Image (spheres, rainbow, N blue to C red):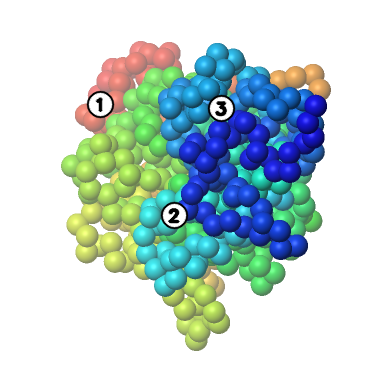
Amino acid sequence: MTGQPTDPTALPIFGGPDEWQDPQEPVRESPAGQIRPRRPAARSLAGRIAARPGAQTGAPAAPAPVQSPNPAPPVLAQPPSGAMSPWLGKVTPTSVPTRLRARATSTTPITPTVKIDWHQVALFRAQTSERLVERLGEDKGKDLEAERELGKEIIQTLLEDVVADRLHDGEQVWRTDEQDALAKAVFDAVFGLGRLQALVDDDSVENIIISGADNVWVEKTDGELVRKDPIADSDKELLDELAFIATRSEGSARSFSTSSPRLHMRLDGGSRLAAAAWVTARPSVVIRRHRLRKVTLDDLVGRDMLSVSQASFLSAAVRAKKSIVVAGPQGAGKTTLVRALCGEIPRYEAIGTFETEFELHLHELTDVHDIVHAWEARPGSGEIGPDGRQAGEFGLEEALYDSFRFNLSRQIVGEVRGKEVWAMIKAMESGAGSISTTHAADGEAAIRKLVTCAMEAGSHVTRELATSKLAETVDLIVQINLDTKPVDAAGTQWRRSRWVSEIVHVAPGEAFKGYATTHVFEPSRHGGPAVPGTMPDELRDLERFGFDLTSYLAENGREESVR
């Protein structure tokens, strides 16, 4: 029996310098001045060496005594032949030493679940960021795609160096799948959303809801609410990550700090992030992922959000250039319905969209809309000037004012939460058939909410003025209902259902109220999409634009002649 070799590279599995060593690498000296053998080439080791089955990720392990001067080579855990790793390149049979090839391909290793060492990820992120700055200098941020590729290269080099050092020192190294998972986690930490990236990349997730680092929920596309693992080790770490994300965003960088305790921004992938801290008990975050970007009214009928009659009516209303406000609670699917409504706009019409953060993304649907000019508001920074605005601030009112030089057929104002309602009113006054959204509990409440928003513009706006303007410009209120019910006895999982519960026609009315309403579709007593109600005479003309008025009247139990 021989003793343990002084260096792991003396083991027969390395096959000498012709297969494993890098002849260009200089001989290294130990701190004591002793000559240490060359370590195996890092780029040769990455993706080939695997930890012993069942070992913990990254945990040091003393090498076992060698029982024979010519021990049998270990079975290496690695991807199948020809598999592509996004970080370590393509692994082929020729990348494995000849005498190991048959052994490695004839045995199927059992790969345990990969656990990521987030402390190690933080260290690698700091090192990657430092090297990026060193390599790019003043060119940082000029070519984002090239910067990402360079980041991958740096991350791979860092991992290979650590693997080689651990192997040289007789310590346990990561398996291939662990290296890939660690590399992706570092890349996400540098260029993405850190631990949140996996949730954002999940196609089954629509909303991510966070109330503290360890209280994380996701809403699936089918309406199910599921609790998830913590996305940070502490609230402070979560705040640091949010601040990093806010300042690093490519298209809409923001400030998030004690002096700016709220954050509303569009993420680089198109999702919408809203966060609050320092004024809330714990950091609160909601990320809205817009899964149904290319959606039609027929799609929503298939999801039981609309009835066939409702879809026919709304399609005709859009084509007839009626002005529509989609209302409902938070997370009810208002933006999704607006996208579907916009899908009924003839593609030759030029569209302008006006949003505080891009959510409609009509400008990305080039196979649906030929011409879309998309405006996004921009917050200012620094001290407030004499005009009451921060430097660089650009509001929806300015965007709408500019848009009248763009020969637009439609002006779509996104979510109305405050005085931007006046931008909506101006768009609707042009008679182009505008569409907007707001938060409200029912159809009439939506009108009252818009009146309140209009009065926020200043004391010069009276309730009578706001009411009369809205009554003259808004044609239809489409109300969406959101219903949440538990799906298990313990109440740990929930499911949400959405449907259009009302379609209300708005017109000028008596002086006391200022407006008159008619329920074209009224709430169903049995739940689900609204049922036909009363058709105002001025809307019967929608039959010219494709509305099936006969079916509407028949469904309502009326045998009227169609005028």
Give the residue at x 50% y 47%.
22
Q: Would you identify the image quadrant in which residue 325 lies?
A: top left
Secondary structure beneath dot 3 equals loop
Residue for point 27% across, 20% down? 562
Q: Are marks 1 and 3 in contact (CB under 8 Å)?
A: no
The amino acid marked with disc number 2 is Leu
Q: Position of residue 245 (x, y in %)?
A: 57, 57
Q: What element carries label 1?
A: loop
Identity, as a three-letter code, of the amino acid under mark 1: Gly
**329 over 262 or under it: above or below:** above
The residue carrying pointer 3 sits among few (fewer than 14), some (14 to 19) or many (20 or more) residues within 10 Å by Cα, namely many
In this figure, which residue is indicated by the disc labeled 2? 150
Residue 277 in view here:
no
How packed mark 2 is, by other alpha carbons closer than 10 Å (few <14, some 14-19, many 20 or more), is: some
Q: What residue type is labelled 3?
A: Gln
If the image is split into quadrants, where does the C terminus sit?
Answer: top left
Q: Kindly identify which numbered label has been placed on residue 546.
A: 1
In this view of the protein, can residue 133 be seen by the observer?
A: yes
Measured Cα–Cα span from mark 1 to mark 3: 60 Å
Splitting the image into 4 quarters, where does residue 1 fall? Answer: top right
Q: Is residue 31 left or right of residue 16?
A: right
Single out the residue that lies furthest toward the bottom. Answer: 386
Query: Who is closer to the viewer here, 530 or 119?
Result: 119
Between marks 2 and 1, how big is the CA–CA gap? 55 Å
Badge 1 crowding class, 10 Å Cα cut-off, few under 14, some 14 to 19, many 20 or more, is some
